[in-house]
Amino acid sequence: MRDLTPRQIVAELDRHIVGQKEAKRAVAIALRNRWRRQRLPQELQNEIAPKNIMMIGPTGVGKTEIARRLAKLTGAPFIKVEATKFTEVGYYGRDVESMVRELVENAISLVREQERQRVEAEAAQRVEQRLVELLAPAPPMGFDESQNQEAAARHERTREKMRTMLAAGELENRMVEVTIQQKATPVMFTGTGLEQMDFDLQGMFEKILPKSSKRREVTVAEARKILFEQECEALINQEKVHAQAIELAANMGIIFLDEIDKIASTETRGADVSRQGVQRDLLPIVEGTTVQTKYGYIATDHILFIAAGAFHRAKPSDLMPELQGRFPIRVELSDLTREDFIRILKEPKNALTRQYEALLGTEGVQVEFTDDAIEALADYAFRVNQTTQNIGARRLATIMERLLEELSFEAADMKMGKVTINAAYVNERLQEVADDEDLSKFIL
């Protein structure tokens, strides 16, 4: 895991997410505590449980974005799942243990990538040797020993020449024949692919189904990529990867559980039938249990869980008391203000204004947003959020698309030119729609 201080984590998040200091600080402290725990004696490590976090706030204020950025910041296994995907054991659908199995798969990808980097140099040497053998195959041996020795010497000179030409890149377009192995992936009659099947059934099918081999004629450049993958796979110790991945996921894994408010049970019947059951199934996972995966058993005691929900209709207190207790750190994310919208349009590296400038720049059209245009856009976003449903920063995407619809359509024919977008341009295209409240509910 990357050695980032809480201040550095918050600074990195600030580059992409505006405001929400409390949530950023809570997440930064939780991540740093994982790093601190790794430096304690083993007996004390086992006693320190992660402090799970629950983020509470309306949609579009940055809860999911914080999770996405965390995944890139940390070198730890990370997955984001929606609580609404799970059903109670006994109902058709995904069970909650599947998220732990996904986390292990994520950890395996991380560890395999590290192992791959370690063996790359040796794999490249092996690929070079195999390419030389493909380009200059060994001559058949005869009965005459002296002729065999002469042929072997000639062959060795040819190989050296091929090796030199390969290194110089002179043979990249020469055709060679390579063997490619493919695994058959069955599709069940339900339409479910192998990855969604129960893990033990999946393992059984992988052993039963034969690998099909076929020979293809490709260029040396393509063959190098194919052979490199094969050699890397052969050099990596899969058992070691699986063991390291399970340990990494168990000690450093992070699961972001989104839409947790949607499984808060209500008084109604019918569609809510399994909500309480999903909460009951989540309890042991969050508290700490052992889950069986096809790579081995993993304990969830030290996995960090970050839950998030808008809690528009439900309240955190509507969750089961036991589940509430598993998330001791609560942070509330605030509604976005007009000033927040201005900052969102100007400050982040991936601000929408920059995205549209880059997109239209590919057509040779230079777009420039003035300060008063950004203020006008923020005004519209804030006002529409207040008068209709509050969807947070996502409202900006709707308004920007409406604003630039005509320009996006005409840009390909304009070929070149400069367009300055100011407050008058914004008002001309959005005023009428924003003023008509019934229309803005549909369009903005």
Image (cartoon, grey):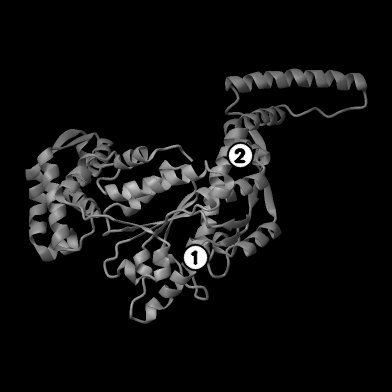
Relative placement, left or right, of 256 versus 315 is right
**Image position of 109 with respect to 136: above or below:** below
Residue appearing at x 82%, y 21% in the figure? 152
Whether residue 84 can be seen here: no
Type of residue at label 2?
A: Glu
Label number found at residue 300: none
The residue that mark 2 highlights is 229
Type of residue at label 1?
A: Val
In depth, the one of 418 and 216 nearer the eye is 418
- Residue 155 image-quadrant placement: top right
Mark closer to the observer (2, 1) = 1
In depth, the one of 310 and 138 nearer the eye is 310
Residue appearing at x 42%, y 74% in the figure? 276
Tell me the quadrant of the picture where the C terminus can be found: bottom left
> Is the residue marked by circle 1 packed among few (<14), some (14-19), or many (20+) residues within 10 Å?
many
Question: If you read the primary sequence from the N terminus, does the residue marked by circle 2 or circle 1 appear first?
Answer: 1
Relative placement, left or right, of 59 versus 35 is left
Residue appearing at x 87%, y 22% in the figure? 148
Relative placement, left or right, of 219 versus 268 is right
Query: How many badges with numbers are in the image?
Result: 2
Residue 221 image offset from top left, x and y in percent: 57, 31
Relative placement, left or right, of 223 versus 364 is right
**Image position of 92 with respect to 326: above or below:** below
The residue that mark 1 highlights is 96
SS category of the residue bearing label 2: helix
Whether residue 250 can be seen here: yes
In depth, the one of 12 and 366 nearer the eye is 12
> Is the residue marked by circle 2 packed among few (<14), some (14-19), or many (20+) residues within 10 Å?
some
Residue 275 image offset from top left, x and y in percent: 41, 73
